[in-house]
Image (spheres, grey):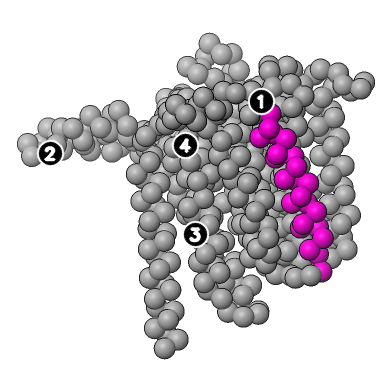
Amino acid sequence: MYNLYMGRLKKVLILIFFSAFVLRLSVSLIAYHGDLNNNISWGTLALERGLNGFYGSSDANDWPYSAPNQPPLSIILFAGIRLIWVGVRSVFWYLNWELLIFPSKTVWFWDEKGMAFLIKLPSIIADLGIGWLIYRYIIQISKFKNHNPQKAIFLASVWLFNPITWYNSSIWGQTDSIVNFLGLAAILQLLRKNLTLFLFFLTLSLLFKGSLAIFVPILLFVAISQRYSLTVWLKAVFFAFVATVLISVWFHPQFDLVFWLVNLYQKRILPGEIGYLTANAFNFWWLIDSGKRLDSMIYFGLPARVWGFAIVLAGISFIIFWLKRKINPRSLFVSLSIVSLLSFLFLTRVHERYLYPFFPAATILLSFNSILLIPYVVLVIIHLLNLYHLFWGPPIPVLINILENGQFKDILSLVTMVVFGIYAVLVLRSEGKKHI
């Protein structure tokens, strides 16, 4: 009976992942965000110009859309996707000329839609990857208590069918799922006390995008607290360094590669392109001024950007102090979820998509405290509306009219802050009551 039961659950799991994949494919071409132009053009130019010196010019006249502001691993992915598109296009054209029965519309479709589809595909796959990591982790921790595969399947489904995930990857075509897949893989390796794989996946995440830099102080604190030997640290750092060199050297094959990379992050990648208080994020700064006000504006003697960093650093310091009392998987995910919310709310130049890192950690936290489902759902709704705002894809007139109301957006920003406070109280007070 047990084997029959597990066999049925396996079939259910396969059906869930297959359905999630089909859902994403079915909506992948219903909208086209302008951000895809950047990714496609960077991939195209990387093939045409080569990777060596690719970041050299920041002059807008040298780039069809904008100068590259994503790390090396992102550019390599975009270039690889472009290479696949060119290869498939050549095959289609060959078949079109050689086989009369080959449908010519396939060639036209590929020329018009193929690159947009391919550029979204890695993010779609990463969506499923995060769902699988969540499932495997819940299965793993349940073995130490009561084996509960239904909970693992449920939470994987919560992730896979969460509209903010497939909207981000399949409709918008953003790469947040890739960054967070690598980040979650790093976190789970840290919990398994595999320092080498932890630093390896964390390095890949940061080399793809700097979004999870906010987690680095927390994760390094936990790694140091695990008291590895010097040999283990040297080995882990060595492999992370090798990965960094192998990925970055294509862009700057010089002896000063490390200094070049630090300079690239400092001047091109981390500052971003928009120096406003908020880059369409419904957060604290939206309530201060939702217009195009620079974050160099002085408030109580300091620039807004400095205030943002100060608040977040103070919050991270508090979380580390709290985490020091008892480090376990639950408290780590609590810490990461709070830091992600704190960063979204109070850092300046924040895009609407930057709330994404909250959700993988919060989804796992649902496994031990069902009351968190209420703030979780509220934040999902607000985040989805925030993603839709200004993109308007696909166009829904009623929703557009609602979101064009300035007071409604102010309310959403205020509710986000209130929910953050409620969520923080709930998860911090739950310490010691139930652990995963």
Q: How far is the residue under mark 4 from the one under mark 2?
A: 30 Å
Q: Secondary structure at mark 2?
A: loop
Residue at 41% x, 88% y is: 1
Can you tell which mark lies on residue 157?
3
Amino acid beneath label 3: Ser
**Of 390 and 313, the residue lying toward us:** 390
- Residue bearing mark 2: 102
Q: How far is the residue under mark 1 from the one under mark 4?
A: 29 Å
Q: How far is the residue under mark 3 from the one under mark 4?
A: 21 Å
- The disc, 1 or 2, on the residue closer to the chain's N-terminal end is 2
Amino acid beneath label 4: Gly
Residue at 56% x, 36% y is: 385
Rendered position, 385 above or below 239: above
Q: Quadrant of residue 309?
A: top right
Amino acid beneath label 2: Phe
**Of 311 and 214, the residue lying toward us:** 311
Amino acid beneath label 1: Gln
Question: Residue pushed farthest top?
Answer: 61
Q: How far is the residue under mark 1 from the one under mark 2?
A: 55 Å
Q: How far is the residue under mark 1 from the one under mark 3?
A: 34 Å
Q: Nearer the viewer, mark 4 or mark 2?
A: 4
Q: Residue 178 appears at what percent x and percent y?
A: 54, 46
- Residue bearing mark 1: 407
Residue at 69% x, 64% y is: 369
Residue at 54% x, 68% y is: 152
- Give neighbour class at mark 4: few <14, some 14-19, many 20+ (Cα, 10 Å): many
Is mark 1 in CB contact (under 8 Å) with mark 3? Answer: no
Q: Which residues are magenta?
A: 410-432
- Residue bearing mark 4: 173
